[in-house]
Image: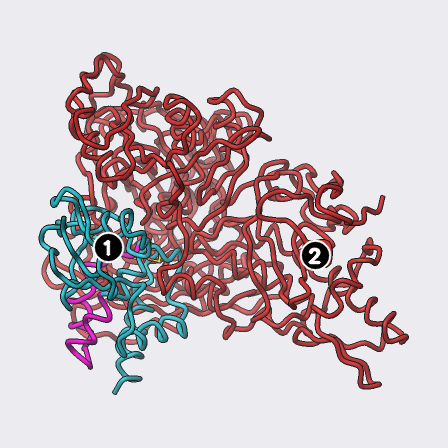
Amino acid sequence: MRNRIENLSRRVFLKQGLAVGAGLTLGIHLGAVPRRLDAAPGATALPEELAPNAFVRIGTDDSVTVIVKHLEMGQGTYTGLPTLVAEELDARWDQVRVEGAPADAERYNNLFWGPAQGTGGSTSMANSWEQMRKAGAVARQLLVEAAAKRWKVDPQEIQVRDGQLSHASGQLASFGELAEAAAELPVPEDVFLKDPEAFRLIGDAALRRKDTADKIDGSARYTQDVALPGLLTAVVAHPPRFGARLKSLDAEAALAIEGVEKVVQIPSGVAVLAGDFWTAKRGRDRLTIAWDESDALRLGSDEILEQYKALAEGPGAVATAEGDAETALGSAAKVIAADFAVPFLAHASMEPLNCVILPEEDGVRVINGEQSQTRTQAGVAEVLGLEPGQVSIEMLYAGSSFGRRGNPRADFTSEAAEIFKAAGGKTPIKLQWTREDDTRAGWYRPLFFHRVRAGLDAEGKPVAWHQRIVGQSIAADAGMEARMVVDGVDRLSVEGAANLAYAVPNLYVDLHSPKLPVPVQWWRSVGHTHTAFAVECVIDELAEAAGRDPVDFRMELLEGHPRHQGVLRLAAEKAGWGEPLPDGKARGAAVHASFNSYVAQVAEVSVRGKAFSVDRVVIAVDCGIAVNPDVIKAQMEGGMGYGLAAALVSSLTLKDGRVEQSNFHDYQVLRMDKMPEVEVHILPSAEAPTGVGEPATPVIAPAVANALAAATGQRLRTLPLELA
Amino acid sequence: MVKITVNGREHALDLDPETPLLWVIREHIGLTGTKYGCGIAQCGACTVFLNGAAVRACSTPLSAAAGGSILTIEGLESAQGRAIQAAWAELDVVQCGFCQSGQIMSATALLTQNPSPTDADIDAAMSGNICRCATYARIRSAIKQAAAALA
Ligand code: FES
Ligand code: FES
């Protein structure tokens, strides 16, 4: 089964078992890594290059190209995954280059997602941890064997360091000098991975990001930047209410604009195409459209919340039932009752959504910062009557995403395909949403309501916890009920609550999943965005009711959860928990586990009347082995900042079915003046690495709310937080 | 015909004078480092220099730039710009990077006018530039580091 590369046309891709089912994440056999690359775009190898698997290529110019299967949307995949390869390869960091993988779920699937290729759930590092190290180790072994052959020495005596092989006899060779010879050798089935003590790049905080240079001089390429001969830019008029449809269209005024090429109807609205964005947008703005709103949603956020409160009066589907919460609440010495509400939120990625599609010989090519290759291939293929394999994807950077670009229904990439088709299927098109489209087109973090009752016994120990959760099911809108909804419970709605870490003997969590025509989707940290808020605020209230210090109280109830305790202890210590603060200032703490990582935050606030500021946030994280400590730090800072926007200012509201906000003047986000001082501490760990993109996000809102409670006595239970 | 100079090169453009400078730069001149983020002067992703002053290109019509000299991220060469870029690289400020051309232009404008900005100066000068990745803490540190390097 060995496949030698002789020329491009003879390159055969060995379909070996990389695309294994979900769950097989460790113990990936190297034999399972396809040995030679086919000529798929973005991952081709020259005959003289060493390309022993789908993830690494060593050129005669001494370059090491790492093929990264995960989207770089800011979270650091183009640095983290190459670090793993370079570590095992003993490459020099500056000889490492990065290339985005093509769409090919056989070779580049997310190992946690079975046969699907995509990025999300903070899984990039975790699912690649072993795979990418092995990819590097195989290449290293081939180089060593090639050198041993050339120098006629025992491979065991060869050293590899910083991109160079050497032998005590004085022989030296670079990777590039050995690449061609190494490419002739059989690819080993199994290799040794380094002992963590031998890591030189993994754990090095001084290692710099691979994408910085391109992103500080304007040369980084995003979908927005794609220019092609004959490319038409499409701007779409979407219906003003969810569930509305096109009734009639008058495109005359739009078509009268010089440069407007076409106006086409698509299922999601009307697209105007022109040679440039501005002309297309002017055309879009001149369309006269009547919408059929007979099935459209006419509710407002306030009414939706009222309906959710009414639903919370009755029992929902049971997510957790341990002991007998109802009876225990009845006999509790003290009961806390608290309602929490969080609004819809738009992701508001920095780059408004967009997608390029162009015809190819036997199908189409999508050019995109693609978060969900498999879904986009399926969605685009369905629209165009192609097989998914006929949809190739060229990977670009994404101007952030926070989940949005991984839409479960491939909404905007399918919309691009609809426009491409309606425009004749021969012309390259770029769909470019405006910021207003991006804000108003749905797929939000759902509005959620929580009703919690928790009881303490006479000694101040929690004896019962009843949490009723009401909100739309993301799994339902994603069409993923079969996988994610068990006994009527969408685990994405209850994650972080149903698995309460605190020791409470009687725990009951139930869920209502009302349906609305407002499409909802995963938003950085998904269900944790609201469950952590409710849980961490309630535990703080319980501590207060018990007359206990909120950190001590948590530590005690987290017995048996050493990683929660570890981060909480560290954050509290670094924040100077318990040390006196000047008047008007206070601290609040929160700790939460998500995506298999543990984050604690201590927020320090200053209050002046109804105004307050968050001055300092101390973060402690346990995410297993810290592969790139500085990237982890950046994700903690940024993930916290993203959550802080939701805690302080962001809210998307409906009124009479219309989204009230449209752009950054009314959909508020965090700005420089509200960014606190941040300090990040990483807990040393020998565990395999876990997620860092999301886990910092849900922790900040409760930390701030708890700090405000400490400062003012007001328990704020609605986001964004507002003092009365 | 409207004439503008971009990064030292002259361009004569036969375009609707109301076309925002942003799209002129991106699509007609082909310099894509300047980004569209909001189109209404709210996010700063499109920040360029017009005759030495930082402006939001999305809200500056071509007519307002007629005869003017424009500098984009691609043409940034001043000592302040270089120092800002160097500090950005040293601190690995960027995440997704989409806002960063605008951040760097605004930060360069700040240092050009004020060689040793305080925190309040930084807040005032940089709050018009949104970063959804919330790289603000590093932006602040990098501005200070660049200021120190230039001092
Ligand atoms: S695009 Fe100009 S300020 Fe946002
Ligand atoms: S780096 Fe992503 S928006 Fe600023």
Task: Name the subunit of mark 2.
Answer: A
- Which mark, by number, is residue A568? none
Q: Position of residue A419 (x, y in %)?
A: 37, 26
Q: How far apart are marks 2 and 1 (CA)?
A: 40 Å
- What main secondary structure does the magenta stretch of the protein show? helix
**Label 1 sits on what residue type?**
Cys
* Residue under label 1: B46
Whether B111 is drawn above or below A320: the answer is below
Residue neighbourhood size for the residue with mark 1, other residues' Cα within 10 Å, grouped as few (<14), some (14–19), many (≥20): many
Give A45 or A503, whichever is nearer the viewer. Answer: A45
Q: Is residue A366 above or below residue A215?
A: above
Percent x, y of residue A387: 58, 25
- Residue A496, quarter of picture: top left
Residue A520: percent from the left, percent from the top?
Answer: 36, 32
* Residue A204 pos. (x, y %): 55, 73
Asked whether residue A573 appears in the rendered view, the answer is no
The range drawn in magenta is B106-131
Q: With A469 as the anchor, is A131 left or right in this view? A: right
Question: Which residue carries the number 2 mark?
Answer: A135
Circle 2 or circle 1, nearest the eye: 1
Image quadrant holding the N terminus of chain A, namely top right
Specify the chain shown as cyan.
Answer: B
Mark 1 within 8 Å of ligand 1, using the beta carbon: yes
Q: Residue at x 84, y 47 (%)?
A: A2
Q: Which chain is red?
A: A
In percent of the image, x 49 and y 64: which residue is there? A210
> Type of residue at label 2?
Ala
